[in-house]
Amino acid sequence: MKIWIYALLVFLGGCSYGVVSTFVKIGYSQGLSLNEITGCQYFMGSIMLWGISIFVPKVRLKYKQWLSLMISGIPMGLTGIFYNQTLIYVDASFAIILLLQFTWISIILQYIFNKKVPNRKNLVATGIILFGSILASGFLKTEITFSFTGISFGMLAALSFAFFIFLSGRTGITIHPIYKSAIMTTGASLIIFIFLPPVFLINDGLTNGLWIYGLLTGVFGSLIPPILFNIGMPKIGGSLGTILSASELPMAVTMSTCILHEAVSLLQWIGVAIILLGITYPNIQMLHIRLSENGY
């Protein structure tokens, strides 16, 4: 396939992540609880990933390797808990902006644990993202009110997602990405079930319509993105992949505007564009090199 096809797959993977918050919000409006939405999302995602993993090559893992991968999935589960909790208190368009703060939090984690000093581009990018977040949040609108509880859960979601990315790059276990995703998602499901007991498995929750939201959030949040990323990322490289996967931000804001009818002003859209610029800026040089290598 041509390089632009792989790039399109990664872009669509990011878009897939972006629609999840809308389904969660709709589920809340139908009377579903945090326990039901979050637990069913990861439960269904795990089942689907294990089903697909049957068809991919697998290697025999040691007990410690299984445990390492499942522990690495814990921050993913915590992200699901915190992010879905955020959606109870704030609009979906604001929640995704809070989650995107993982970009600069990741830089801090790299400095703390790997003693990796951020370069000038990363510092500039962090400033751009923070400025764009202020605009996109609607903070400058005098009539807007904020939920500090929602903001707190949103920042916890960003922190846990940054830890998930950090730990994912340190496992050092070479297996098929889909098989790896299935194990890590299982770890995420277990930590969710500890904090949010899966009572929906023993009552009539699934037969009362919960399965629909679990299927939708599981497909768009746990199934499609890993598959598309695993196909496209190795071909286009991490720099271009980072830029294209950021499509989840405009997609989430668009979905919240069109489906949930949340009000998003022109100034907030400008903030979204600035955030995307901040994500793109550190990777511009590598993006140019990558495209040049493929004749673009």
Image (cartoon, grey):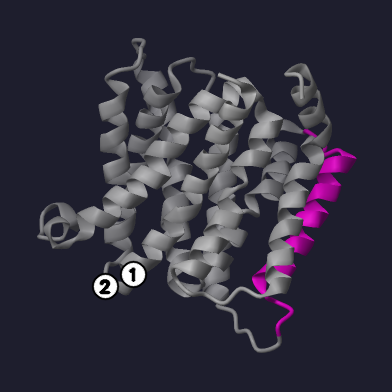
Q: Which image quadrant: the N terminus?
A: top right
Residue 184 appears in the figure: yes
Badge 2 crowding class, 10 Å Cα cut-off, few under 14, some 14 to 19, many 20 or more, is: few
Compared across the picture, whether 235 is left or right of 284 comes to left
Q: Which residue is mark 2?
A: 31
Magenta includes 120? yes
Main structural element of the magenta stretch: helix, strand or loop?
helix
Amino acid of disc 2:
Gly
Magenta residues span 116-141
Badge 1 crowding class, 10 Å Cα cut-off, few under 14, some 14 to 19, many 20 or more, is: some
Using the image as rendered, state which of residue 121 and residue 111 is in the foreground.
121
Using the image as rendered, state which of residue 117 and residue 28 is in the foreground.
28
x 63%, y 84%: residue: 144
Magenta includes 47? no
x 31%, y 23%: residue: 53
Q: Indicate whether 168 appears above or below 83.
A: above
Query: Disc 2 to disc 1, how far (Cα)?
Result: 5 Å
Compared across the picture, whether 2 is left or right of 38 comes to right
Residue 193 appears in the figure: no
Amino acid of disc 1:
Tyr
Q: Which residue is mark 1?
A: 28
Whole-percent x and y of residue 232?
55, 26
Using the image as rendered, state which of residue 3 and residue 214 is in the foreground.
3
State the image quarter where residue 25 is shown. Answer: bottom left
Q: Indicate whether 176 appears above or below 256.
A: above
The answer to whether the residue labelled 2 contacts the one labelled 1, judged by CB atoms less than 8 Å apart, is yes
Mark 1 residue element = helix
User: Please, which residue is most extreme toward the bottom here?
Assistant: 143
Q: Which image quadrant: the C terminus?
A: top right
Mark 2 residue element = loop
